[in-house]
Image (cartoon, helix red, strand yellow):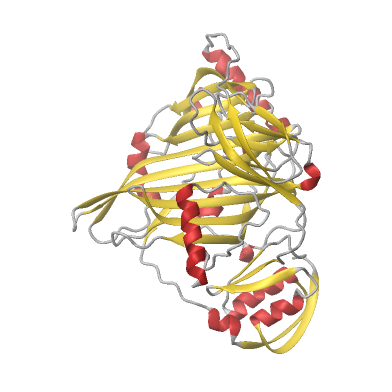
């Protein structure tokens, strides 16, 4: 299994492209080119960066354009003049977005979720429309914000979390603030001793039912991605992005996901300690975290669906039952047979007791693997700086849509100790990334071109030069905690000066 955090310790320099956007003029002559291809070509010709919402205009529509002495912004305005979009230039980046004031016809609800018994806030609560592919999740303060089309009024909104009874409410037709209380699950589950053969039977049925339980056609996923880097509990960088993911069918794990960046915002808190700790790959790598589709932790069976011990890297143990989304799920723990030479994980699979779908998994590198892993993801150590990985773990959730389960949420956390031997400083860095899938729909059009996709070598914070004050509009996100929210509010105040 590939690493999904790659780090680079560098000094960053950002160059503005404002002059190229506003002042430089060009002669452009294109026949029968799609709007998307024209934007790609203009980016190369003018040396600019363009971010846009692909739903705001028909990217695949063919156009012809022939102009002389046009700036890049003027050329974009000409080809998009028929569409309700605005073109802004912020900090050297062109942003194309829907015009403000258009009736979005959507409802916004927000609120807080807490534990009925302890009154503590509940994070990681899944919030989803029954039978639909849209949803969000509560943050570490138990807060959430959720936006949906007004025509969903009266449908059911489900709040669910592992180990808690789920709650269902009718969706209001107006903006609403809610307080949701979830009770710890009281459904009695009798203690059952399960032999190794029973564990194998559960895993065998999981493998047999993969085709039935997961999508067998290509999908387009709309996702919200947040990346935070902190140093000794103090934020250094917060980056957020809206992305589109083209995902292949689950029966063909060899067709890899492609990711297109739509727009983003960031807040840098300054370089503290002389080291810039950055995460490379971000949305590209997290779009490919899918243990079910990649068969990461499944046992090997022969053609008769029999367990083949000699080829299995992991051992499996039954860990009891629990409640998830109101359903009984099996908990199966896995750990490496022999933790030598390669990189191995230990964790749990949560398997639905009736459909045998994997509905949740969490896993982390074993301690021996952590020691072996450093060279795999630390790209550069500067001077007398030593890096020591402390923990790496992931949580992946799936949610049901109709008869199939879809990827819902991916969360990854990397903690690394950085030792500056010159200054005798020992610092703990923490990088956390979250990918929330807010919508899934059939894939329309052709595959994203390589030139317009987010690459593995990209650093997300380096790709974003602007912060739109009305950034999210109707898009669903993970509500930021107060520290992040305050940071972006401060950014807005700065921009008005």
Left or right: where does residue 46 sit relative to residue 403? left
Q: Is residue 213 above or below residue 407?
A: above
Q: Looking at the picture, does residue 79 appear above or below residue 386?
A: below
User: What residue is shown at x 28% (from left), y 49% (from top)?
Assistant: 427
Residue situated in front as seen by the camera: 151 or 419: 151
Depth check: 423 or 22 in front? 22
Residue at screen point 77% across, 65% down = 58
- Which x, y percent locates residue 240? 54, 55
Q: Taking the image as drawn, is residue 40 in sight?
A: no
**Percent of width and height locating residue 293:** 62, 39
The residue closer to the viewer here, 139 or 375, is 139
Q: Is residue 256 left or right of residue 194?
A: right
Q: Nearer the viewer, residue 251 or 14?
A: 14
Q: Residue at x 54, y 75 (%)?
A: 92
Location of residue 269 by image quarter: bottom left
Rendered image quadrant of residue 210: top right
Left-right relation of 373 to 214: left
The location of residue 432, given as percent across then percent down, is: 45, 47
- Which residue does the image show at 50% across and 59% down from the upper left? 489
Q: Is residue 64 visible?
A: yes
* Spot occupied by residue 333 in the image (x, y as percentages of width and height): 49, 24
């Amino acid at each position: 299994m590939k690493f999904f955090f790659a780090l680079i310790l560098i000094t960053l320099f950002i160059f503005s492209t404002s002059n190229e956007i506003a002042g430089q003029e060009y002669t452009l002559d294109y026949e029968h080119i799609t709007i998307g291809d024209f934007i790609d070509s203009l980016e190369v010709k003018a040396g600019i960066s363009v971010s846009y919402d692909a739903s705001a205009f028909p990217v695949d529509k063919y156009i012809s354009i022939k102009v002389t002495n046009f700036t890049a912004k003027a050329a974009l305005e000409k080809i998009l003049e028929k569409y309700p979009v605005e073109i802004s230039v912020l900090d050297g980046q062109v942003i194309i977005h829907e015009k403000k004031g258009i009736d979005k016809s959507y409802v916004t609800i927000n609120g807080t979720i807490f534990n009925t018994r302890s009154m503590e806030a509940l994070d990681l609560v899944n919030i989803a429309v029954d039978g639909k592919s849209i949803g969000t999740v509560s943050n570490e303060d138990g807060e959430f914000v959720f936006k949906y089309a007004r025509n969903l009024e009266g449908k059911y909104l489900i709040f669910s979390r592992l180990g808690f009874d789920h709650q269902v409410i009718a969706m209001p037709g107006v903006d609403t603030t809610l307080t949701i209380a979830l009770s710890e699950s009281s459904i009695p589950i009798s203690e059952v001793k399960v032999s190794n053969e029973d564990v194998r039977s559960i895993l065998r049925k999981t493998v047999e039912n993969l085709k039935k339980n997961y999508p067998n056609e290509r999908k387009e996923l709309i996702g919200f991605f947040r990346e935070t880097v902190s140093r000794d509990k103090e934020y250094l960088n917060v980056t957020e992005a809206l992305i589109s993911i083209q995902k292949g069918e689950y029966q063909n794990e060899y067709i890899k996901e492609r990711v297109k960046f739509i727009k983003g915002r960031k807040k840098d808190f300054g370089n503290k300690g002389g080291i810039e700790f950055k995460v490379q790959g971000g949305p590209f790598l997290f779009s490919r975290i899918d243990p079910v589709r990649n068969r990461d932790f499944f046992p090997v069976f022969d053609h008769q669906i029999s367990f083949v011990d000699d080829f299995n890297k992991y051992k499996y143990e039954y860990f009891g039952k629990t409640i998830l989304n109101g359903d009984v799920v099996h908990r199966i723990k896995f750990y490496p047979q022999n933790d030598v030479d390669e990189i191995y994980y230990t964790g749990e699979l949560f398997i639905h007791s009736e459909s045998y779908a994997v509905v949740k998994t969490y896993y982390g590198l074993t301690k021996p693997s952590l020691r072996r892993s450093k060279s795999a993801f630390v790209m550069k150590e500067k001077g007398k700086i030593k890096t020591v990985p402390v923990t790496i773990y992931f949580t992946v959730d799936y949610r049901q849509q109709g008869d199939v389960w879809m990827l819902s949420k991916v969360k990854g956390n990397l903690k690394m100790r950085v030792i500056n031997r010159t200054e005798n400083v020992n610092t703990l860095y923490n990088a956390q990334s979250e990918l929330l899938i807010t919508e899934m729909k059939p894939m329309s059009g052709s595959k994203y071109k390589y030139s317009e996709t987010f690459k593995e070598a990209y650093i997300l914070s380096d790709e974003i030069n602007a912060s739109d004050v009305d950034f999210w509009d109707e898009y669903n996100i993970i509500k930021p905690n107060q520290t992040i929210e305050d940071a972006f509010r401060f950014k807005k105040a700065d921009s008005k000066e």
